[in-house]
Image (cartoon, helix red, strand yellow):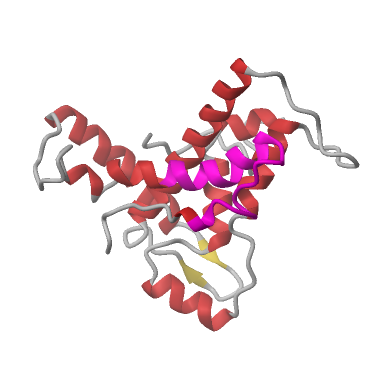
Amino acid sequence: MNIISEIPPGILNQPFFDSDRPKYMNYGAMGYVIGHEIIHGFDDMGKQYDKDGNLFDWWEPASNKSFHEKAQCIVQQYANLTNEKINMTLNGINTQGENIADNGGIKLAYIAYQKWLQRNKVEPQLPGLKFTPQQLFWIAAASNWCSKVRPEMEKLAIMNDFHSPNYYRVIVPFINSGYFAKDFNCPLGSKMNPKYKCRVW
């Protein structure tokens, strides 16, 4: 596993980024990617390195304990999900770092967009769509992971990939976000706004 996070400049194009489109789309798509990579510095692997990149246990014991408890929630949450198309349970341990980065990354992107809104005026909705700018942030983020995968590839990915299948890279971080629930008016206790959510960052 590569513990060095990087963002190739070549992805600063469609579909992740375009200077001529609304900021809610850029923050949702590219902001999610940037937030994801930042959180890798504080996931189960990244937290083992200090600010100079040295392998060093620099966390206070109480912080370490709290992190492991919260990370275990993420591990269990994903491990309790079954891809019904192929009847396989996700591997919450193998994908722990990427899941932490997905959940924290979308939160960072959303907060960054809210800070942008504090300094600027609310952008207009896209013509012909009923979605608010806040909702379009989430739709842009979800579009990062749009894909069509053959069942055989899904099985291989669940067995070997450090990332969860794309569907779960969208649905689970959104389920864990109170911001998403607020923006889409999801009732507490509904599928997309469960009472109990997992949060590391």
Which residue occupies the foreground of this view, 117 or 189?
117
Which residue is located at x 39 percent, y 69 percent? Answer: 161
Residue 153 falls left or right of residue 130: left
Residue 119 sits above or below residue 102 on the image? above
**Residue 144 magenta:** no
Estimate the x, y position of residue 139 in percent, counting from the top left.
68, 45
Place of residue 153 in the rendered image (x, y in percent of width and height, measured from the top left): 52, 79
Residue at the spot x=86%, y=41% of the render?
Answer: 129
Residue under the image location 26 percent in, 55 percent down: 3
Seen from this angle, which residue lies furthest top?
118
Residue at point 59% right, 30% down? 179
Where does the image place residue 46, in percent across and percent down from the top left?
24, 47
Image coordinates of residue 84 in percent, x first then y, are 59, 69
Residue 186 visible? The answer is no
Residue 160 in the image: above or below residue 110: below
Q: Quadrant of the N terminus?
A: bottom left
The verdict on residue 17 being magenta is yes
Instruction: Say if 164 sits above or below 75 in the image.
Output: below
Above or below, comparing residue 49 to residue 122 in the picture:
below
**Pick the front one: 107 or 155:** 107
> What is the span of residues highlighted in magenta in the rendered image?
10-36
Which residue in the rendered view is the most extreme toward the right?
128
**What is the quadrant of the C terminus in the image?**
top left
Tally the marks: 0
Q: Is residue 89 visible?
A: yes
